[in-house]
Image: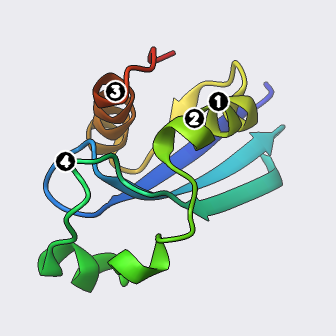
Amino acid sequence: MPLDFTAIDFETANSSPASACSVGLVRVRDGEVVATANWLIQPPPGHDEFQEWNVRIHGIRPEHVLSAATWVDQFDRLCGFAGADVLVAHNAGFDLNVLRRATEVTGQICP
C-alpha cells in the first residue's frame, strides 16, 4: 500500500494563528522522503508582532523575516508544493488552523 502525503509544520510570531512566520514541508512517496522545503514568511499586518514566548520556541525574530515574502506572495508556492496530497502534521489542529486563518485574513481561499 503506497504511503504518499505531505507533512506541514508552521511557526507563528505570536498567539494569533494568522501570524505564520515560517513553514516546513516534506513530501513523502511510497514511504520515502522525496522533497523538502522550508522558508520564512512575513506575517500579515495586524498579526506581525513577535512575542517573546514564540521566539523562545522557534528562534525566529522580526529581523529574520524583513526580506521574506508575505503570506500572499508565498501562498501559491505552498499550495504548489503540497499539490493534491493529504496534509499531515504532528499538531494538525494547530497547523491547519494557521493555514485557514492566514488565508482568511489575507483574502485568500483555503484549499
Label 3 crowd (10 A; few <14 / some 14-19 / many >=20): some
- What residue would you read off at disc 1? 79
- Secondary structure of the residue carrying numbered label 3: helix
Q: Between marks 1 and 3, how big is the CA–CA gap?
A: 13 Å
- Residue type indicated by callout 1: Cys
Q: Are marks 2 and 1 in contact (CB under 8 Å)?
A: yes
Element assignment for label 1 = helix
| Number of the label disc, if any, that sits on residue 75 | 2
Dot 4 alpha-carbon crowd within 10 angstroms: few under 14, some 14 to 19, many 20 or more: few
From the image, state whether disc 3 or disc 4 is nearer to you. Answer: 4
Looking at the picture, which amino acid does disc 3 mark?
A: Arg
Report the colour scheme: rainbow
Residue 8 versus residue 58 in the image, above or below: above
- For the residues labelled 2 and 3, the Cα–Cα distance comes to 12 Å
Q: Is residue 51 visible?
A: yes
Task: Describe residue 77's horizontal placement relative to residue 52 as left or right.
Answer: right
State the residue at coordinates (15%, 73%): 51
Residue 97, quarter of picture: top left
